[in-house]
Image (spheres, rainbow, N blue to C red):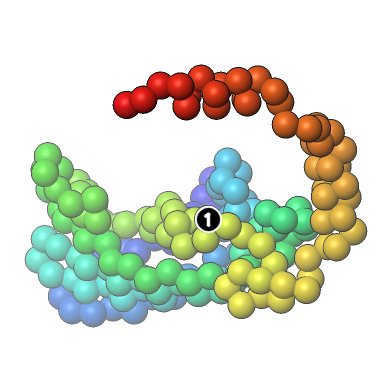
C-alpha cells in the first residue's frame, strides 16, 4: 500500500554533496493525513533547499500559503495567510543527550528522509495564537456580525444583574483602616 506521505520524502543517498532544491505542495490530501491536528484545509507551497555534506544535511525550509482556521470572534472559517522559515539539521548517527532541538538524528543505514511531520508542525507553529478576521492582513469586516451580536447578547444575559455595592466590603474596608502597619 502506498502512503500519501511518501511524496514528502527525499532520497538523499544518491545525492552528491552540495545544494539540492525541492518543492512540496501542502493541500487537503496532505492535511487529511493528520486527522488529530487542528488544520484540515490549506493551500501552501514548501520550498526546501537541502545542503548535503558527509554526515550532515542542512534543510532550509520556506513555507507560504493559506490555511483554513476558525475565527476566534465569530466562529466562521476563513483562509488565513501564513508563512514559515526555518532550518533543520539532520545528522547520521546516534542521538546525543545535549543535542539541539533543531537537530534530527537518523540511522546510518537510512537512505531517505520524510519531511511530512516536520512540514506539518512548521505550518502549525507559524499560526498566530489569536486567529480572527483582520489577522495577517485579512479583511476584518468579514467577521459575522450576526454571530457577534448573538454572543454579546448571550453574554449580557449570563451576567449577574448589576447591584448596589455589597455592604460586607464596606465592613472589610473599615476593618482594614483600623489596623496600622
Q: Is residue 114 left or right of residue 38?
A: left
Give the residue drawn at x 55%, y 65%.
Answer: 26
**Place of residue 128 in the rendered image (x, y in percent of width and height, measured from the top left):** 52, 61
**Quadrant of the rendering where the N terminus is positioned:** top right
- Which element carries disc 1, helix, strand or loop? loop
Q: How many marks?
A: 1
Q: Is residue 142 left or right of residue 109?
A: right
Q: Is residue 175 above or below residue 76?
A: above
Give the residue drawn at x 83%, y 48%.
Answer: 151
Residue that carries the numbered disc 1 in the rendered image: 129
Q: Nearer the viewer, residue 44 or 54?
A: 44
The quadrant holding residue 55 is: bottom left
**Quadrant of the rendering where the C terminus is positioned:** top left
**Place of residue 19 in the rendered image (x, y in percent of width and height, measured from the top left):** 23, 79
Q: Is residue 143 above or below residue 121?
A: below
For residue 29, say whether it is visible: no
Give the residue drawn at x 34%, y 79%.
Answer: 21
The quadrant holding residue 60 is: bottom left
**Place of residue 85 in the rendered image (x, y in percent of width and height, measured from the top left):** 37, 71
For residue 142, say whether it is visible: yes
Amino acid at each position: 500500500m502506498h502512503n500519501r506521505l511518501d511524496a514528502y520524502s527525499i532520497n538523499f543517498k544518491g545525492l552528491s554533496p552540495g545544494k539540492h532544491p525541492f518543492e512540496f505542495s501542502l493541500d487537503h490530501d496532505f492535511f487529511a493525513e493528520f486527522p488529530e491536528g487542528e488544520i484540515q484545509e490549506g493551500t501552501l507551497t514548501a520550498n526546501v533547499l537541502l545542503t548535503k555534506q558527509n554526515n550532515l544535511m542542512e534543510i532550509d525550509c520556506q513555507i507560504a500559503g493559506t490555511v483554513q482556521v476558525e475565527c476566534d470572534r465569530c466562529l466562521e472559517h476563513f483562509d488565513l495567510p501564513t508563512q514559515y522559515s526555518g532550518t533543520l539539521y539532520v545528522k547520521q548517527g546516534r542521538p546525543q543527550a545535549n543535542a539541539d532541538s533543531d537537530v534530527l538524528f537518523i540511522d546510518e543505514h537510512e537512505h531517505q528522509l520524510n519531511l511530512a511531520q516536520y512540514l506539518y508542525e512548521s505550518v502549525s507553529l507559524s499560526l498566530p495564537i489569536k486567529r480572527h478576521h483582520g489577522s495577517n492582513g485579512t479583511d476584518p469586516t468579514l467577521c459575522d456580525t450576526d454571530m457577534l451580536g448573538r454572543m454579546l447578547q448571550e453574554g449580557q444575559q449570563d451576567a449577574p444583574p448589576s447591584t448596589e455595592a455589597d455592604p460586607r466590603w464596606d465592613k472589610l474596608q473599615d476593618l482594614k483602616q483600623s489596623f496600622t502597619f
